[in-house]
Amino acid sequence: MNWLDLVSYFFGGVFLANAIPHFVAGTLGRPFQSPFAKPPGEGLSSSTVNVLWGSLNASIGYLLVLHVGDFDLRTISDAVALGLGALLISLFAARHFGKFHGGAQPTR
């Protein structure tokens, strides 16, 4: 197993998981934070921008997972690398976007 393949699968998981909120928000016609908003990551981008951003993330994730190495979901190391990337970006997004959408944990 090439460790660079596992790094690719990790970042593939990051991009695939990041595609979900952008694509869903855009498809629902809702504005959502994106890197193209002002300020980046905090301001809202249009639903069209979010559909395009989500689609680009999904495409990059696809390329990183299925066109690098020989990804096999039944191989523990491959699945863990993909899942860990998806989990970590999802936890980050939950904390970051929760500040704007009422989902952040209260500070004490």
Image: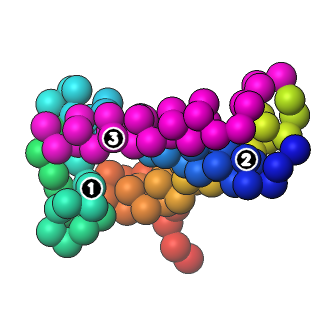
Which of 68/15 is in front?
68
Which residue was labeled with disc 3? 56
Which residue was labeled with disc 1? 34
- Dot 3 lies on which element? helix
Query: What's the distance in space between the residues labelled 3 and 2, CA to CA?
Result: 21 Å
**Is residue 43 found inside the magenta-colored segment of the image?**
no
Q: How is the image coloured?
A: rainbow
Q: Earlier in the sequence, mark 1 or mark 2?
A: 2
The amino acid type, in three-letter code, at marker 2 is Asp
Q: Position of residue 33 (x, y in %)?
A: 26, 54
Q: Position of residue 50 (x, y in %)?
A: 23, 42
Q: Earlier in the sequence, mark 3 or mark 2?
A: 2
Q: Position of residue 105 (x, y in %)?
A: 52, 61
Main SS, magenta residues:
helix
The picture quadrant where one finds residue 86 is top right
Q: Nearer the viewer, mark 1 or mark 2?
A: 2
Where does the magenta region start and end? 48-74
Which of 5/22 is in front?
5
Query: Measuring 55% from the left and 48% from the top, which residue is drawn there?
Result: 14
Q: Earlier in the sequence, mark 3 or mark 1?
A: 1
Which residue was labeled with disc 2? 5
73 versus 40 height, above or below: above
- Asked if residue 11 lies left or right of residue 5, the reply is left
Query: Measuring 17% from the left and 55% from the top, which residue is drawn there?
Result: 44
